[in-house]
C-alpha cells in the first residue's frame, strides 16, 4: 500500500497569515484568546494540537442526517486507505460526541459532519467548523453539502449540482439579520468545484443536472406541501409557484440548506458546492413512488460523486509530489 504523506494534503502557513484571515472575517477573533467551539466539543486552548490534527483538512463534507455522514465516513476511509495513513478508528471516532449535537469524523484530508435540518443548526456548524480550520492553519479547503431533495423537473435519482441558491420567495441569495438589520448575500457555488463534479458524474455515468436550488427553512409550507398540519393555499397555488420557480428562475430542486450554505462559503472565502439527488419530481406530484432499494441507491449518488472528486484531487496531488 502506498501512503500519501500528510504533506500532500497540507500547506503550512504562517500563524500571522491565518490570524489576518480571522481578523479580516471577524475582527473580534484572535489566536491569543481561547475560543470554545461549544457545539463541536472543541476549544483552542491547545493550538498546536489543533494544527497537528486538522491542518491537513482539504474537504469538509456535510449532510443533514447522522446516518448519511456515518456512511460517508466509512466510504471515505475505504477510498482513502490506499493513499493516506490514518488511525484505524478514523471513520468511527466521533470527535464531537461530547457535545451531543453533531457527529464529526476526520478521515485523512476529509472532515465530515452532519448539520441537522434547516438554517439554524447548519449556521452553527458552518461557523464553528470554519473557525476550527482557520485556527488550525488549514488552507485551500472546500465545503461540500450532500443530501436529498425534491426535484422540480428532475427525475428521481438525478443529482442536481447547484449553480445558485434561492430562498423560499424565489429570490437569489440568503438574507442575514444581525443587530436588527437585513442584508442579502450572494449564494453561488464555486465554478471550479462544479466543473469537477460534472466530470465525476460523467466518469461514473450518474445522471445530473446543473441548475438552481431553492433553500427553504421549512419542510411543509415554505415548500408548498399540502400535507402539513396547517395549509392556507390551494393545489393551484402550489403548482403555479413551483412551475414559475422552475421555468423563470431555473430552480431544479427544493431543500432546506443550500442558500445558507453557499452564502456562508462566499462570505468566508471558502469554495463551496451543493450536490443533492432528487427523490421525487414534484412537478408530477409529492408521492415518492421509488422502492426502498431504489431510494438507497439514489442517496448514494452524491456521495459517489464527492468521493470521486476527492480521489481525483488526492491522486493529482500525489503525482505532483512524486514529480517534484
Image (spheres, helix red, strand yellow):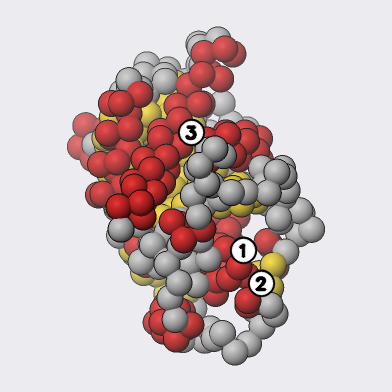
Mark 2 burial class by Cα count in 10 Å: few <14, some 14-19, many 20+: few
Q: Residue at x 51, y 58 (%)?
A: 6
Element marked by disc 2: helix
Tell me if label 1 and label 2 are in contact, CB under 8 Å: yes
| Residue 63 position (above or below residue 151) | below
**Quadrant of the image containing the N terminus:** top right
Judge left or right: residue 297 versus residue 49: left
Where residue 234 sits in the image (x, y, percent)? 43, 27
| Residue 38 position (above or below residue 186) | below
In-front residue for pair 133/319 = 319
Q: Given the current orientation, which residue lies at the most extreme bottom position?
A: 32
Q: Residue at x 36, y 66 (%)?
A: 269
In-front residue for pair 222/11 = 11
Label 1: which residue?
53
Judge left or right: residue 225 versus residue 214: right
Label 3: which residue?
303
Label 2: which residue?
49
Amino acid at each position: 500500500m502506498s501512503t500519501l504523506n500528510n504533506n500532500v494534503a497540507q500547506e503550512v502557513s504562517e500563524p500571522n497569515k491565518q490570524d489576518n484571515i480571522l481578523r479580516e472575517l471577524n475582527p473580534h477573533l484572535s489566536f491569543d484568546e481561547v475560543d470554545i467551539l461549544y457545539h463541536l466539543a472543541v476549544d483552542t486552548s491547545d493550538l498546536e494540537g489543533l494544527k497537528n490534527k486538522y491542518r491537513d483538512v482539504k474537504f469538509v463534507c456535510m449532510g443533514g442526517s447522522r446516518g448519511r455522514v456515518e456512511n460517508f465516513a466509512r466510504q471515505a476511509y475505504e477510498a482513502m486507505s490506499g493513499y493516506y495513513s490514518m488511525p484505524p478508528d478514523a471513520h468511527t471516532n466521533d470527535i464531537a460526541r461530547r457535545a451531543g449535537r453533531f457527529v464529526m469524523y476526520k478521515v485523512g484530508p476529509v472532515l465530515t459532519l452532519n448539520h441537522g435540518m434547516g438554517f439554524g443548526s447548519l449556521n452553527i456548524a458552518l461557523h464553528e467548523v470554519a473557525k476550527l480550520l482557520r485556527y488550525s492553519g488549514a488552507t485551500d479547503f472546500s465545503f461540500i453539502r450532500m443530501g436529498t431533495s425534491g426535484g422540480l423537473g428532475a427525475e428521481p435519482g438525478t443529482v442536481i449540482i447547484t449553480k445558485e441558491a434561492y430562498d423560499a420567495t424565489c429570490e437569489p441569495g440568503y438574507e442575514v439579520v444581525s443587530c436588527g438589520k437585513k442584508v442579502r448575500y450572494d449564494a453561488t457555488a464555486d465554478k471550479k468545484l462544479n466543473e469537477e463534479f460534472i466530470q465525476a458524474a460523467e466518469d461514473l455515468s450518474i445522471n445530473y443536472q446543473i441548475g438552481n436550488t431553492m433553500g427553504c427553512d421549512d419542510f411543509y409550507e415554505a415548500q408548498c406541501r399540502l400535507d402539513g398540519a396547517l395549509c392556507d393555499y390551494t393545489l393551484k397555488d402550489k403548482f403555479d409557484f413551483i412551475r414559475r420557480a422552475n421555468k423563470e428562475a431555473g430552480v431544479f430542486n427544493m431543500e432546506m440548506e443550500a442558500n445558507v450554505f453557499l452564502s456562508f462559503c462566499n462570505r468566508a472565502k471558502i469554495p463551496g458546492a451543493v450536490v443533492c439527488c432528487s427523490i421525487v419530481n414534484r412537478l408530477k406530484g409529492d408521492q415518492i413512488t421509488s422502492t426502498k432499494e431504489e431510494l438507497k441507491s439514489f442517496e448514494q449518488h452524491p456521495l459517489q460523486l464527492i468521493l470521486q472528486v476527492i480521489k481525483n484531487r488526492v491522486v493529482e496531488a500525489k503525482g505532483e509530489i512524486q514529480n517534484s
